[in-house]
Each structure stands twice: as C-alpha cells, then as structure tokens.
Amino acid sequence: MIFLQLFYEFFKIGLFIIGGGMAAVPFLQELSLNTGWFTQAQLADMIAISESTPGPIGINMATYVGFTVGGFPGGLIASVGLVLPSIIIVLTVARLLSKFKESTLVESTFYGLRPASVGLISASALSLVGISLLRFELWEQTGMLTDLFSLKAILFAVVLFFLVKKIKAHPIVFIAASAAVGIIFKF
C-alpha cells in the first residue's frame, strides 16, 4: 500500500512542477504535513543534499523520500512517479505541436506558462528562506520575536551572497565551504 501511495503522491507532484525541481518544494512541504514521512528540517537537508549531488533536484528528492519511506523499491517507485507525468505530457505535446504549431491558442498557453513557472520557483525560494533562516517552532513556543530569526544563518547567507558575487569560483567551492561552515557552527 505504501508503494502505491508513494507513486500517487509523486505522480501528482510531477504533474504540477512546471519550472523544474525547485518548484517541487511547496508540494513537498505539503506532502510532509499530510503524510508525516519527513519533517521540515529533513526537507531542508534533502534540498541541500539534492542541490549538492549530481542529477535533477526533483528526482533526487523523490528518490530520497521514497528510499526513506520504502527502501530501494520506494525510491524507485517515487522517482518513476515523479517523471512519468513529464514523459506523458512531452510525448502528447510533441504530437500535438506538429499539428498546431501555428495556433495562437498554443502560443498563448506557452506565454501563460512562463509566469506560472516564475511563481512556483518564487514560492520555492520563499519556502527555502523560511526553512533556512527562520525558526517558526521556537517562535511559537516562546512568542519572542527575537526567537523567530536564526541570526547565524542570516549572517552566513548574507556573507555567502556577497562572496558569490565577488569571487568567481566554481559552485562546488561554495557548496564545500558551506558544508564545512555548517559542520563547524552547527546551524
């Protein structure tokens, strides 16, 4: 039963993540709340690991959740569930586009998908800010506004932002340095 649920949940996510893997973050947050398969902190770790490892982030996250919930078969089933809608849609669109490539309806549809992609990716960015820089759980417990912000994480994000702009290095340098800082300071 768990395998069917994994496939179903990730098929739904795969159906609506227009714009790439980061657009899956809001869907994964909802999945976390609805199923309890992983926490918000684990989601932040999952994003960090998926961004740092080779391969598409969405598939990396699906494999991670599936493996956590159902072992190797779960990881495989969640990954297939995530990519299957894209395969179906691409094959269908390719077939239809050859017939309707001059259609204003098709052109308008693609024009409308652009802002939808930006919106989904922006929602992911805001979710990541909340997960990485804010401490909602602590704030809810204490009610103190100062407990809402993770000052170390915010300071690190600002420093890293300026370093990325200033230093022209390969992204792996920043990933490795960030991992080292996280280990040393235990954000």
Image: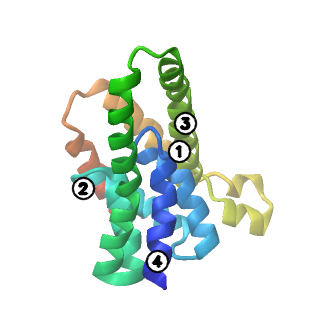
Image side of residue 153 versus residue 138, left or right: left
What amino acid is found at the position of numbered circle 4 in the picture? Answer: Leu
C-alpha span from label 1 to label 2: 19 Å
Placement of 26 over or under 62, stated as above or below: above
Q: Quadrant of residue 99?
A: top left
Q: Name the residue nearer the viewer: 186 or 133.
A: 133
C-alpha span from label 1 to label 4: 26 Å
Q: What residue do we see at 55% from left, 36% from top?
A: 122
Q: Earlier in the sequence, mark 1 or mark 4?
A: 4
Q: What residue do we see at 55% from left, 55% from top?
A: 27
Residue 169, position in %: x, y?
A: 20, 33
C-alpha span from label 1 to label 3: 5 Å
C-alpha span from label 3 to label 2: 22 Å
Circle 3 residue: 122
For mark 4, does the 10 Å Cα neighbourhood hold few (<14), some (14 to 19), or many (20 or more) residues? few
Q: Earlier in the sequence, mark 3 or mark 2?
A: 2
Task: Kindly indicate whether the residue at mark 3 contacts the one at mark 1 (C-beta within 8 angstroms).
Answer: yes
- Mark 2: secondary structure: loop
Q: Earlier in the sequence, mark 1 or mark 2?
A: 2
Circle 2 residue: 53
Residue 51, position in %: x, y?
A: 32, 51
Q: Name the residue nearer the viewer: 66 or 88.
A: 88
Circle 1 residue: 124
Label ID, residue 4:
4
Placement of 93 over or under 45, stated as above or below: above
C-alpha span from label 3 to label 4: 31 Å
- Mark 4: secondary structure: helix
Task: Kindly indicate whether the residue at mark 2 contacts the one at mark 3 (C-beta within 8 angstroms).
Answer: no
- Mark 1: secondary structure: helix
